[in-house]
Image (tube, helix red, strand yellow):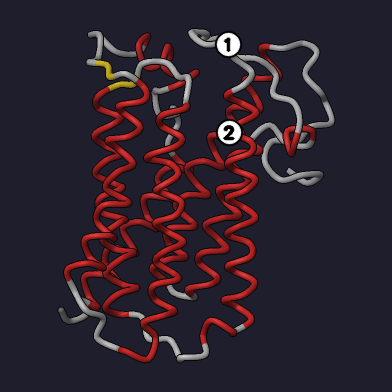
Amino acid sequence: MQCWDNLINTLSCVIFLMGVSHLVRLPQAPYGRYLDLGLSSSSSMPRMMPARLAWFLQEFPSLLVPLMMMMTTTPNHTGSSLGTSLLLGTFCLHYFQRTFVYSVLMRGRPFPLRVMIEAGVFCSLNGFTQSHYLVHCAHYHPTWTSDTRFLIGSTLFLLGMAINVHSDYLLRNLRQPGEVVYKIPKGGLFRYVSGANYFGEIVEWFGYAMATWSLTTFSFAFCSMCFIGRRAVHHHRYYHETFHDYPRSRKALIPFIF
């Protein structure tokens, strides 16, 4: 398959603009602690899905599409096949964890069907964009895996993923089985920020973007930062409004800074 350069550039711009739209959109996506706000602003009760099933279905396309791309096509440049496989493998590693580990272990509230479908469409679109670019469009020198950008980016990706997974573990264990109440998170990077899990994921995706060094992957990192970064700020506000003993020195997203 040839590189659909114009299509990938267009989709990359669309993903970037989706990030911008998240920054200017007033309401938060109505799931989790913001579900009640969505229900109060709706004239009818939305259809709901079990949280674990919803997360599995919406995240799975981001894993399935790249795997199908890799299995059914041959890269059109043999010099960087190893680098391409490694880079795409980082993307798949994240979504394997989100699809088969996080969704199984999570203890969340029922999930609106509409939000699940919207997220699934984005994951499908982004999964295609990232995988088509890396398999068919990216041109890396055979020594790319020893390049400083790849090494630093890969390190940031793994560090961010470790922070993200550990923070999710801490959040998950704040609740007993069957509980849906929200409590003050403690431990790990939660000592410094309210959105430690989001901070980890942002570091993860900007590390991925640095390792790949392309408009396509940076547009996804930017979009992710806009969506989950803004959500971290709202979480921070929620904690301060809900818990009078919430640590005042704790930042919203970036330790010691913001």
Above or below, 60 relative to 1: above
Q: Residues within 10 Å of mark 1 (few under 14, many from 20)?
A: few
Q: Picture coordinates of residue 20 (x, y %)? A: 43, 50
Q: Could you give the CA–CA distance between mark 1 and mark 2, rounded to whole angstroms? A: 15 Å
Asked whether the residues under the numbered discs 1 and 2 touch, taking CB atoms below 8 Å apart as contact, a structural biologist would say no
Res. 233 mark: none
Q: Dot 2 lies on which element? A: helix
Q: Residue furthest right?
A: 249
Name the residue tied to disc 1: 176
Give left or right: position of 57 versus 159.
Answer: left
Label 2 environment density (alpha carbons within 10 Å; few <14, some 14–19, many ≥20): some
Q: Position of residue 196 (x, y in %)?
A: 66, 38
The quadrant the N terminus occupies is bottom left
Q: Tell me the residue that label 2 is attached to.
A: 168
Q: Position of residue 189 (x, y in %)?
A: 74, 39
Q: Amino acid at mark 2?
A: Asp
The correct choice, above or below, for 16 with respect to 175 in the image is: below
Describe residue 28's horizontal placement relative to residue 10 as left or right: right
* Element on which disc 1 rests: loop
Residue shown at the point (46%, 61%) measured from the top left: 90
Percent coordinates x, y for residue 179 in the rendering: 52, 8
Image quadrant assignment for residue 113: top left
Q: Is residue 152 left or right of residue 90?
A: right
Query: Which residue occupies the foreground of this view, 124 or 28?
Result: 124
Q: Residue at x 45, y 31 (%)?
A: 26
Q: Residue at x 65, y 15 (%)?
A: 183
